[in-house]
Image (cartoon, rainbow, N blue to C red):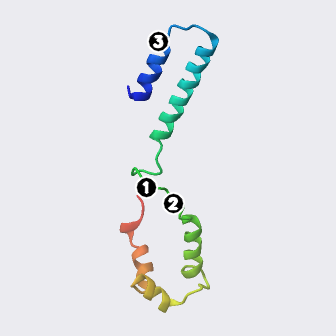
Amino acid sequence: MDNRGNCIFSFMFHDDSDDEEHHQRVIEAIVHHTSQENEATKHGGSVVSRVYKNREREDRHSNLMSDYFVERPHFNTTDFRRRFRMQKELFYRILNEPYFHQK
């Protein structure tokens, strides 16, 4: 039990007053302690102290497809080669290999 838990425990059981105000303060202390524990266990991502950043992957995928892989792409084959370091025909040949198909 941490310091807050010890304080609540001693506050609940070592005080001799049985009035309604004391019970209300005990309930408030428990609620406060629980909320503090919940906030302490939250973190932003799979690594502690790292914050999740929305990279909008679906939008990026749509942009990539419209820029390079549609019937009339925004960028030509020279731009494709410059960005992906391979010719577009080679990319399609690799894509259509049976090794890369899901079984």
Q: Which residue is mark 1?
A: 50
Residue at 48%, 18% (x, y): give it: 11
Question: Which residue is at the front of the view, 14 or 98?
Answer: 14
Residue at 43%, 74% (x, y): give it: 95
Residue furthest to the left in view is: 99
Examine the rendered structure and indicate whether residue 90 appears above or below residue 46.
below
Which amino acid is tagged 3? Answer: Phe
User: Which numbered disc, 3 or 2, marks the residue closer to the eye?
Assistant: 3
**Contact, mark 3 vs mark 1 (Cβ under 8 Å):** no
Q: In the rendering, at what x and y percent does residue 103 appear? A: 40, 58
Mark earlier in primary sequence (3, 2):
3
Question: Which residue is at the front of the view, 53 or 68?
Answer: 53
Q: Which residue is mark 3?
A: 13
Horizontal side, residue 82 vs residue 18: left or right: left
Which amino acid is tagged 1? Answer: Arg
Residue at 51%, 30% (x, y): give it: 34
